[in-house]
Structures are given as C-alpha cells and as structure tokens.
Amino acid sequence: MSVRPLSNEQLRAQAPSIFSENPIEGVSDKYAFVPTYSVLDTFRQAGYYPIMAGESRVRNHENKGYQKHIIQFRSLEHLLRPSANEEYADIVLTNSHNRTSSFSVDLAIFRLVCANMLVVPSHTFSHHSIIHAGFNFEKVHTAIEEVTSHMPSIQEEIETFKAIELSVAEQHSFAKVALDIRFDKEVHSVDFKEFLQVQRDEDEAPTLWNVFNRVQEAIIRGGIKGSNKVTGKTFTSKPITAIDANLKMNKELFTIVQMVADLKTPSLMMAA
C-alpha cells in the first residue's frame, strides 16, 4: 500500500487546528504559544513526513480551532519502500492550543494489513511531553531522536510476540482482560469471544501478536454486540475515534501484551 506524505494544505483540510495562529483566549503570560504547523519542517528535516492528521470534536464552540490534534509521521525510508515491512514504526505528535495538552511525541506501530495503529506506552521508552512554557525547537529535535532510537528494540519485541503461541484458555484470558478495559462489566454484558473473531487469514495463527491485533481491531473499530444489564437493551459498540480514548486504549492493550510476553517468554526459551 503506497502512502503519500501530506502537504500543509492537506493537513489543514484534515485538522485545521494544527494551523491556529494564536492560542485560546485566557492563557497566562507564561504560556509560550507555538503553533503546531511550525514544527512540521522540523520533522521533515529529520526524515519524517506527515501521513495522517485528525482533531478532537468540540462541544464548546470556544474551543473550535484550538482543540487537541494528532499527526502521524512516517520515515522517508518507509515511504520509499512501502511494501518492505508488515509493520511500520511511526511517530505520533499530539498537541492543542487550548491548554488541555502539551506537545507529546510518541512511538506508534502501524500495521499494514489492517491499517491499525498501535501507540506504544511511555513506560516502554522515554516518552516526550514538551510543555508550552519554555518551549524551544531543540526539545523537539531531542524528542524525535529519543523516540526513533527505541524503534529497533520495539520491532524486536514485536517479533517476540509473533513467536509466542497462546492456548485457547490463554486467548480467552487475554480477551476477558481487554473486555474489562473497554466495558463496565457491572453495566454491560458482552461475550468476550467477540473480540477473538478472525477477520483475515493473516490473523488466524494463535500467536500473541495476532490475538492482540484481533482484539485491538474489534475494540477500536467497534461493532461488538452486547446488552445493558440495567435497561435490558441491546447495543453495538461504536468506533473509538476520540484522540485521548484511542491513545489510552492502545497503550493499555500493549501493556497487557507485554505482560503476557513476560510470562510466556521463559517457556519459549526452554522450548527452543
């Protein structure tokens, strides 16, 4: 799948808040406003180009144009060789101009076969959150260098996930934990097996990586059927589109995968 980098005009169409020329009214004198678009060339010069952007919906009209937004960057190498890998290690930048978010630079794994993006939790590497007070572009350079330095180790970890096979019982346990993250079991009745449905041949093998991807896709894209224990009404889960909710869910799921891998890796090594 060939992906073309986005121009500033295309980014503006996807997330106008990236190009806000001023912060929301009422910020303090210590707030150093730096429009997100001003760091785009910093990423490009580092060899990472924007391929996706989005912004949060706003309920309060005063936040429109200043709300939280997200940009996904991919390396020039992977843009030039689009079919070289099953997964790409990308960079994700989130920011806002209404005091609700600092500049945050995260590592993300984008899976080509299903267009799913996994954001790696900050405890796995040196996550960078850059506050607006005292902001400077050198901090952005440092964040990019730090995040990209961890890409090889994360990719090695994924290869380990692919080598770990889960029994049916282990798959069920994984899905049950994921269900508790997504739904309130005191209110919602959902069959955990819905999370394990195989949507494509590539995910059929019972590896930890495949099971994770089945569960993640079911949660993020929605379509899970259940019922409300209080009202008795049935429901179908909606896609998770809010930036904060999506990032939080991804990071929590990845943490579960790492915990399972830690438990299973010794037995894998013994079997080898």
Image (cartoon, rainbow, N blue to C red):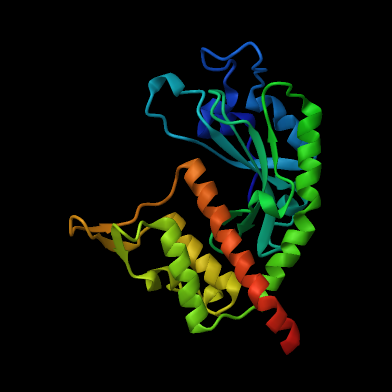
Residue in the picture at 69% in, 83% down: 267
Residue in the picture at 57% in, 17% down: 23
Can residue 1 be seen here? Answer: no
Left or right for 226, reference 83: left
Q: Seen from this angle, which residue lies furthest left?
A: 232
Identify which residue, 253 or 236, lies in the foreground: 253
Left or right for 39, reference 13: right
Quadrant the N terminus occupies:
bottom right
Say if 3 sits above or below 6 in the image.
below
Q: How many marks?
A: 0
Quadrant the C terminus occupies:
bottom right
The location of residue 215, given as percent across then percent down, is 48, 66
Say if 30 sits above or below 45 in the image.
above
The location of residue 228, given as percent across then percent down, is 24, 58
- Figure quadrant of residue 236: bottom left
Residue in the picture at 71% in, 29% down: 39
Left or right for 115, reference 29: left
Identify which residue, 1 or 33, lies in the foreground: 33
Say if 122 sits above or below 60 in the image.
below
Say if 255 sits above or below 60 in the image.
below
The location of residue 261, given as percent across then percent down, is 65, 71
- Figure quadrant of residue 254: bottom right
Can residue 106 be seen here? Answer: yes
Q: Seen from this angle, which residue lies furthest bottom?
A: 271
Residue in the picture at 49% in, 23% down: 65
The location of residue 183, given as percent across then percent down, is 38, 57
Q: Seen from this angle, which residue lies furthest front?
A: 186
Identify which residue, 51 or 2, lies in the foreground: 51
Left or right for 14, reference 187: right
